[in-house]
Image: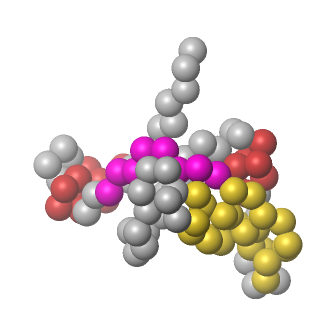
Amino acid sequence: MKKIEKKCWVGWFDQIVDGSKTYDLRLNDFEVEEGDVVLFREWDPKTKDYTGREVEKKVGFVGKWKIDDLTSWWSRAEIEDKGLQIISLKDN
């Protein structure tokens, strides 16, 4: 297990803290595995500085895809036209 520090923009940070945002979409430019801990540091893009608020979350499922992987499910044109969405799953 390792701890990973990431910026989190104002607004989305509040949703992570209150539990309504239970996923995170990131560029695959760092190593992360199930069981790692992410330290989210709230970042204000207007001031270009951290607010001082932080929250830690444990990593669950990690999925990694490249565009070519995604085109096995949808055409590149469909992806460019409609975009993608991530759906968080919770128990009923």
Q: Does residue 39 appear left or right of residue 50 in this picture? A: left
Name the residue at the left extreme. 72
Residue closest to the eye, 92 or 62 = 62
Instruction: Identify whether 60 is placed above or below 5.
Output: above
User: What is the x, y in percent for residue 19?
Assistant: 71, 40
Q: Quadrant of residue 79?
A: bottom left
**Left or right of 1 on screen, residue 21:** right
Answer whether residue 18 is magenta in the image.
no
Residue at 43%, 73% in the rendered image: 30
- Residue furthest to the top in view is 92
User: Can residue 75 be seen in the rendering of this structure?
Assistant: no
Relative height, residue 79 to residue 19 (above, below) = below
- Residue 27 in sight: yes
Residue name at image x 50 percent, y 30 percent: 89
Q: Residue at x 19, y 56 (%)?
A: 69
* Residue 22, picture quadrant: top right
The way the protein has been coloured in the rendering is secondary structure
Residue 78, percent across and down? 26, 50
Look at the image and say whether residue 60 sits in the magenta stretch: yes
Residue drawn at (64%, 44%), measured in percent from left and top? 21
Say which of 71 and 78 sits in front.
71
Q: Where does the magenta region start and end?
A: 57-64
Q: In the picture provided, is 21 more to the left or to the right than 53?
A: left
